[in-house]
Amino acid sequence: MGSRTALVEDLMERFPHVPREAVFKEDLLRGGVAFDPSALSDNEAGEVKPKSYFIFSFDHGTLPELGEAALRRPPEEIILTGGPYDLRRTVVSVRVNPTSPYRVAADEEGLLGLYLDGRRIADVGVPPMPEYYRHKLSNGKSVMEVAPTIQWGYLIYLTVFRVCQYFGAKEECQYCDINHNWRQHKAAGRPYTGVKDVEEVLEALEIIDRYDTQKTSTAYTLTGGAITKTVAGRDEADFYGHYAKAIEERFPGRWIGKVVAQALPKDDVQRFKDYGVQIYHPNYEVWDRRLFELYCPGKERYVGRDEWHKRILDSAEIFGARNVIPNFVAGVEMAEPFGFTSVDEAIASTTEGLRFFMSHGITPRFTTWCPEPTTPLGKANPQGAPLEYHIRLLEAYRATMDDFGLSSPPGYGPPGPGNAVFSVSSFMDSLPANETANETAKETANEA
């Protein structure tokens, strides 16, 4: 095809059941977006909520390679509407790529738009600076550093351990740049707290609760790197769990509590539940056995794929199947040199995994792979997976949910094109708009 526009339009025509908004969103997530200087903010002093780098870089270049976008941060997310495709409101996580065919720029009247192949294809909205970001903790730290919010304010993202104890080429997941992201922010002199103090987290949440008068923030996620030994004398379940315990004691019922951790033994998972966690994300990363062993060597060494999956199923006995929501990294199935070489093979493998979990009532979700250049898979696959893979995955995902009579998972806000706020993949955009965020939150609270 001669242009990116032609490729996108061809896929929209071939897969009419996938929302057109999701086609553009997946292309932006897999390949990134460039920002004209006119579209960049003045960071913490400005009127636009800046990108917080809440766990991974989610960029197609290192900070020194991003130019002005590293000095004047782009927005955390953008909203696409209108344009020649009449797009419904679509929230997209920002992944910066100075060489992307997509570009955000202001027109002569100062209005932001998304341009593809030189043509304006959508109006662009940026998140306003939330009032709670304008207030500091008593020690001078910013709320954005301690408790950033994403998904248009829906989710408080608490990366309380910013490095991973799977370290080095023989242990790190081959698509993950959590350790490099830590290093690059420290090298740039940016505040980037390695282990967040529980009292700092509570103080940041108090500020959010005080100034979030519309109660837009609905959930929090506790997450960080894997813990194979201890952090501050605590094992993984106790380390992440003690934050949940403190939050639930201070703010009972204020937010849906979620934790992203390894697939842990049942006794450890019970501790999460006892601490007040409502949703558990034991991410399985990639389904294929060979690719899991190659791409997740630390997880294979310490736990193993079969045991990982067994633990996911076991955790449903504690949380209920609906509240166990493992993530996979959509696109690494096709990463060279070991991945599938055809979209058909990749979709078949991923669908096999979806059917395995959904047959047990567990609904996985996914993050669209961003090939960060400091990771082995990012270096070898700077273009990521083909857009067709991502579009067909949305089709297969919804079809598999329908086969097993499942609906959108709790804790992700409303589903449906024009409604969804989940920003790092389009799985919520591609599901029926048959729930509201409040209904989902109530359902989760009742099931917990």
Image (spheres, rainbow, N blue to C red):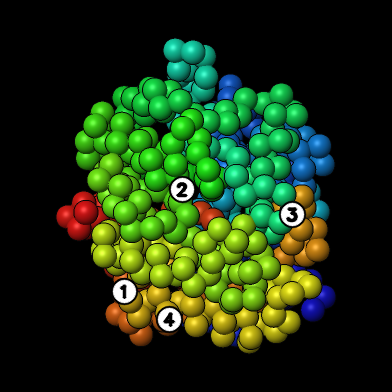
Residue beneath the point at 40% across and 75% down:
357
Residue 103 showing in the rendered view:
no
Residue beneath the point at 82% across and 41% down:
65
Q: Is residue 202 above or below residue 381?
A: above
Q: Nearer the viewer, mark 4 or mark 2?
A: 4
Residue 408 in the image, given as x and y percentages of width and height: 35, 66
Q: Secondary structure at mark 1?
A: loop
Q: Which mark is residue 355?
A: 4
Circle 4 Cα neighbour tier, 10 Å, few/some/many (<14 / 14–19 / ≥20)? some
Q: Nearer the viewer, mark 1 or mark 2?
A: 1
Q: Is residue 136 left or right of residue 74?
A: left
Q: Which residue is mark 1?
A: 361
Q: Nearer the viewer, mark 1 or mark 3?
A: 3
* Of the image marks 4 and 3, the number of the one nearer the N terminus: 3
Q: Which mark is residue 169?
A: 3
Q: CA distance from mark 4 to mark 3?
A: 31 Å
Residue type at mark 1: give it: Gly
Residue type at mark 3: give it: Ala
